[in-house]
Image (cartoon, rainbow, N blue to C red):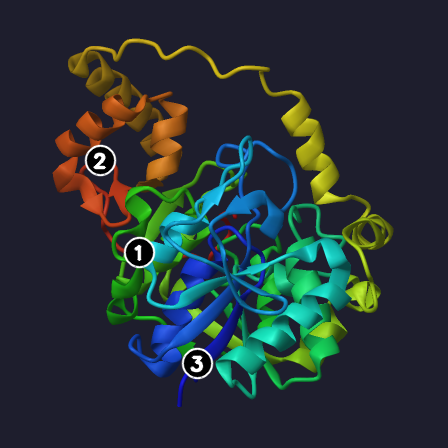
Amino acid sequence: MENTRRLLIAAGGGGDAITAAMVHAALYGEDTPALVLTYAWERLVVDPVPGPRRAADFHGTEAAAPDLVLVTPGTRPVAPAGSLLPRLSGELRPRLGLLDPYGGALGLARQIAAAARWCRADRIDLVDVGGDIVARGDEPTLRSPLGDALAVAACAATGLPTGVYVAGPGLDNEVPPPDLLPRLGEPALTLAAGHTGVVAGVFDWHPSEASALLVAAARGVRGVCGTRDAPQPVHLDAGAAAVHRLTLDRVLTLSPLARALAGTGGLAEAEEASRAVCGFSEIERERRRAAALPAAPPAPRPDRDPAAVLARFAAWERETLAQGIAYATTRRITEELDLGAGEARRLFAALGDRRAAPLWRLGPAAGRPQAGRVVGGGR
């Protein structure tokens, strides 16, 4: 039947759409038509404008139906905003639709209901990487609960049957695993290497670390990995590739923020709910960070000599190995070594035999299985 598709929602924006594509492949097969609804809400290094983007922040979207806007490879953000969603839409099998949270949970519910009608879907699969979707709100490491909780509240408002899938528990480094795992119960499935083909080329350019860690775990990478944003390194074990399924009612019971967002009609109102429950608004934090950015990007500097970059990497690698870390993300290496685009390309080409896609092995002992529980990541 025309437009019959599975409907998935990437709960938090950023890399959740990548994870949703993998979960879709595991649940239904990668060739099953699907629509993934996602926020255009990305790191300031990608989008220097704080908060999520709405449809008016893009040129060239596709109005598939009232309240349903699709992002295509030809879509472009309106400057000064930035977004990786157009490029992502060209690489993922599912189509991508835009979640606009500026109408609060009720506005999102209208968009989700419109998408369900367009897909002819009778249920929703809500996907989160890491597990902050079940945060209580008082975790000291919690950074970005608002998008996830709004998606939960919106799905509840639609009245449509909704299954919630948490993939890669702890990989976002927001809820400590000892607190998180009892809330999730036993895994429903475990992602394997065959489920990662749908995102094979994404991490050559996409900065999501939590999704990259999930792909690595699904491909059998085991050991300690360092990421850019995590205060602690990540221990990749078999549980890092697990996917846990919860009912929507269970998630609402676990998430005070999702309950507080029920009935909200605007993003400002949702921010106030976040301040009341969690003590902060992540959008306000983004506003402060954006205000501290330089008024103009720094002028490009000449690339350093490749031998000097390799020497800098070797020194950094020794320091990192001394911390017990055996793997690193592309983003961590690039940012901590302050590499320009050309420098990064040449360095990674020279490190080709270290590739543990989408991670990089460090030192001769890297790749040996190491026991441990997952404790890190980021959007």
Camera-nearest label, 3 or 1: 3
Which dot, 2 or 3, sits closer to the camera? 3
Q: Nearer the viewer, residue 262 or 90?
A: 90
At numbered mark 1, what does the secondary structure look like: helix, strand or loop?
loop
Cβ atoms under marks 2 and 3 closer than 8 Å: no
Q: Give amino acid for label 1.
A: Arg
Please identify the quarter of the rendering in which residue 159 is found: bottom right
Residue 260 place in picture, x, y as percent = 83, 64
Between residue 14 and residue 135, name the one nearer to us.
Answer: 14
Q: Secondary structure at mark 2?
A: loop
Task: Give the distance between the C-alpha atoms of the residues marked 2 and 3, in whole angstroms.
Answer: 45 Å
The residue lying toward the viewer, choosing from 227 and 133, is 133
Residue bearing mark 3: 5
Local crowd size for mark 1, using a 10 Å CA cut-off: few (<14), some (14–19), many (≥20): many
**Mark 1 — residue?**
222
Count neighbours of disc 2 (C-alpha within 10 A) and say few if under 14, some if 14 to 19, many if 20 or more.
Answer: some
Figure check: 269 above or below 43? below
Q: Position of residue 191 (x, y in %)?
A: 35, 71
Q: Quadrant of the N terminus?
A: bottom left
In the displayed structure, does residue 364 sit left or right of residue 27?
Answer: left
Residue 278 in the image, given as x and y percentages of width and height:
79, 51
Per the image, the residue denoted by label 2 is 363
